[in-house]
Image (tube, rainbow, N blue to C red):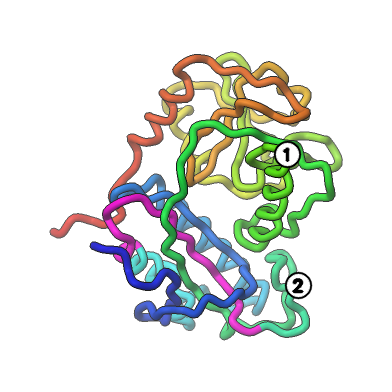
Amino acid sequence: MSAPEHDLFEWTGDGFRSAPHRELPLLAADSWLVTEGAALAVELHRERFSTAVANVVDAVEPGHPPHGSEEPALDVDAFFDALLESIPEQEQWFPRVELVARSIGPGADAVEDAAATPVSVSVADLRLRWRLRPAPELRRSVVLSTWSGADPRMAPSVKGPDIGRLAAANAAVRASGADEAMFTDASTGAVTDGATSAVMWWRGDAMVFPDQRLPRVASVTARVLRTVAAARGVEVREELASPEELDGLEIWTLNALHGLRIVTEWQDGPRSAEQPGRLEAWRAALGSLRRPLRRPPQ
């Protein structure tokens, strides 16, 4: 299947229509890498996005029936099924699904915080849409910089509302040669999340992640990695650790685009290390789990 002529599509409840490129408040989003028609854990992306949509709908109109039952235009499962059939099976793509507010009044700031109850939008104003985007160049390494300003995230546990603010943070650290901003918890100083990636590190043979109590997006790639590690008998644990406490350790970032990347430099932060072959072995393990987006005909 060749790429569609347009690249932004709105769900109508029974199909897609081309959507104008208008900036609308982004309330939830998700994205994943598609290589030659296959992707990693796309059903987990569907689950995360569906949960985010349900939370927004409940915040807008508490007690509203589950999305899709009375609002076909918010039927996430039908939307997902249709878009997976629409993604080209050739080349690499990085599609993004979005929940946007079509029309918003003076309370726009409130609706961008998925934890708030927006007063300026109704369920009827919510729309599902998706973007077909070519995948950018993929990389195996990353340079980090600890974010030194106020945390720009308004909804740190929801993917979508903060995308613009996180892009601005990354642009700021790129001016000094870094690739990505890394955030720390204001009260403990512990590493929490990158602007576009989760983070983990190795202590000996143990795989370590930030403490689950720290506010951050629930990373699909981290979830898959932890599952594979547990199946292989690798110790997985969590801890509160400042950047300084990671000095001399092997540190990885994880996201749906690049997969696993090794930190080769952390500006004004910990020195990094690398055990030869370890990153490639785990990248191969996750790569082997990619599955076709479309079911073969019966």
Q: How far apart in space, not on screen, are marks 1 and 2 (Cα)?
A: 33 Å
Q: What residue type is labelled 1?
A: Ser
164 left or right, relative to 189: left
Q: Mark 2 points at which residue?
A: 110
Query: Is tag 1's residue or tag 2's residue first in the polypeptide sequence?
Result: 2
Q: Residue at x 61, y 75 (%)?
A: 24
Residue 102 counted in the magenta span: yes
Q: Residue at x 45, y 52 (%)?
A: 32
Pointer 1 with pointer 2, Cβ within 8 A: no
> x, y (%) of residue 133?
44, 59
Residue 213 visible in the displayed image: no
Quarter location, residue 232: top left
> x, y (%) of residue 267?
73, 30
Question: Residue 156, relative to residue 174: is it above or below?
Answer: below
Q: The residue tagged with tag 2: helix, strand or loop?
A: helix
The magenta-colored residue range is: 84-103
Binning the other alpha carbons within 10 Å of mark 1 as few (below 14), some (14 to 19) or many (20 upward) gives: few
> x, y (%) of residue 156?
70, 53
Q: Which of 198 and 34 is in front in this view?
A: 34
Residue 25 counted in the magenta span: no
Q: Nearer the viewer, residue 35 or 208?
A: 35
Q: Which of 253 and 77 is in front in this view?
A: 253
Which mark, residue 55? none
Q: The residue tagged with tag 1: helix, strand or loop?
A: loop
Q: Name the residue under label 1.
A: 176
Question: Residue 8, relative to residue 20: is it above or below?
Answer: above
239 left or right, relative to 91: right
Q: Which amino acid does label 2 sit on?
A: Ala
Residue 2 visible in the displayed image: yes
Quarter of the picture holding the N terminus: bottom left
